Image: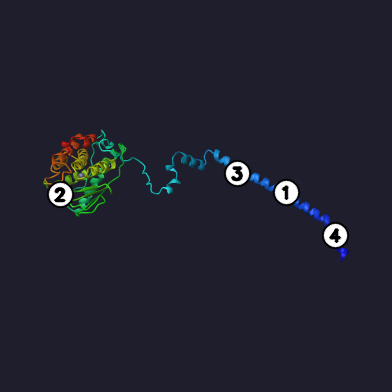
């Protein structure tokens, strides 16, 4: 049993040596191969990076250049600032009254609108007022574009009820139409055009003049005059003498803007009636002086008709007597 085991011993020794040498060689080869592969991989990634920087049209390079110059246009910054409202493209309102771009040396070109016949029925009245509003849109929109001021159409509703509006409170005065800038809404109260003493045949002309006045307020808020004026009014106190004067300047300017539209759009008979009607409206006895005396309410409408020039509607530079 010993012989065979002892006899077997010598040949085993050299075979083990060769095996160890073989394994070592194999390890060296594998390691060398790994080093070479790693170098190749690194070189490849370096060359890809180099190509990325020098490529004239890579998407990554374009995004990086935006990020470096203006962070407001990079998409990654938007989810990080969810409270910042998106800035609408296009013209912006200007927070100024007397120096507002709406007070430009510019008039409305002569032109007409086709309106349906007046009707004593509700549907007919709505059709007429909608056509009247479309007419106002068509006449004012190009002027606002020319002045680089924002424009959008207002909404319209006709109601017999006192309503709560986003502009505050329930309307207790059932005789006046009104405009709310918070939702761009003109609310027409029929009493405001039915109350003319000239009779029912003038309802259409009255309704159109009233609509043009409310549209004047819409233009004031689009341009920035409305908010600027109201901010000053609030700061002065709405019922203070200064606050009431600011309210009258806003109201009388809406009259002047309405006059510009009316005179450039309708025939002599309608214009003559609307001017006469305007001189009957305004702050009556016992009422808070927030719209202007009748003489001034009429005069500013007539001023718009005869001058047809936005700069002449600048009630914010007018003498106090003219806005009393
Ligand atoms: Zn008004």
Which badge, 3 or 2, is on the more N-terminal residue? 3
- Residue 190, image x and y in percent? 18, 51
State the image quarter where residue 234 is shown. Answer: top left
The CA distance from mark 3 to mark 4 is 54 Å
How far across and how far down the image is residue 238, in percent?
21, 45
Query: Mark on residue 45?
Result: 3
Mark 4, mark 1: which one is toward the viewer?
4
Q: Is residue 10 left or right of residue 316?
A: right
Q: Secondary structure at mark 2?
A: helix
Tell me: is circle 1 under 8 Å from ligand 1.
no
In this view, the mark in front (1 or 3): 1
Does dot 4 land on a helix, a strand or a loop?
A: helix
Q: Residue furthest bottom?
A: 1
Residue count near mark 3 (Cα–Cα under 10 Å), binned few <14, some 14–19, many ≥20: few
| Residue named by callout 4 | 9
Residue position marked by numbered label 1 in the rendering: 29
Residue at numbered disc 2: 194
The kind of secondary structure element at disc 3 is: helix
**Which of the two discs, 1 and 3, labels the residue nearer the N terminus?**
1
C-alpha distance separating marks 4 and 2: 130 Å
């Amino acid at each position: 049993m010993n012989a065979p085991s002892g006899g077997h011993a010598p040949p085993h020794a050299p075979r083990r040596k060769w095996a160890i040498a073989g394994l070592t060689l194999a390890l060296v080869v594998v390691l060398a191969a790994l080093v070479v592969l790693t170098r190749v991989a690194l070189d490849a990634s370096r060359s890809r990076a180099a190509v990325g920087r020098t490529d004239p049209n890579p998407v990554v390079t374009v995004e990086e250049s935006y990020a470096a110059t203006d962070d407001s246009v990079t998409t990654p910054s938007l989810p990080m600032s969810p409270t910042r409202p998106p800035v609408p493209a296009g013209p912006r309102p200007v927070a100024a009254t007397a120096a507002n771009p709406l007070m430009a040396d510019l008039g409305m070109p002569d032109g007409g609108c086709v309106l349906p016949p007046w009707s004593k029925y509700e549907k007919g009245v709505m059709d007429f007022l909608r056509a009247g509003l479309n007419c106002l849109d068509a006449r004012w929109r190009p002027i606002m574009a020319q002045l680089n001021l924002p424009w959008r159409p207002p909404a319209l509703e006709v109601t017999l009820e006192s309503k709560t509006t986003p502009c505050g409170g329930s309307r207790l005065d059932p005789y006046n139409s009104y405009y709310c800038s918070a939702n761009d809404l003109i609310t027409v109260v029929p009493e405001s055009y039915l109350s003319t003493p000239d009779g029912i045949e003038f309802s259409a002309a009255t309704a159109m003049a009233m609509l043009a006045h409310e549209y004047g307020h819409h233009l004031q808020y689009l341009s920035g005059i409305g908010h600027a004026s109201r901010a000053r009014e609030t700061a002065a106190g709405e019922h203070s003498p200064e606050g009431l004067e600011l309210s009258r300047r806003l109201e009388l300017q809406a009259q002047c803007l309405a006059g510009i539209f009316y005179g450039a759009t309708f025939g002599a008979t309608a214009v003559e009636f609307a001017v006469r009607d305007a001189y009957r409206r305004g702050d009556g006895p016992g009422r808070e002086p927030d719209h202007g005396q009748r003489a001034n309410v009429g005069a500013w409408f007539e001023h718009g008709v005869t001058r047809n020039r936005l700069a002449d509607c600048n009630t914010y530079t007018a003498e106090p007597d003219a806005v009393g």
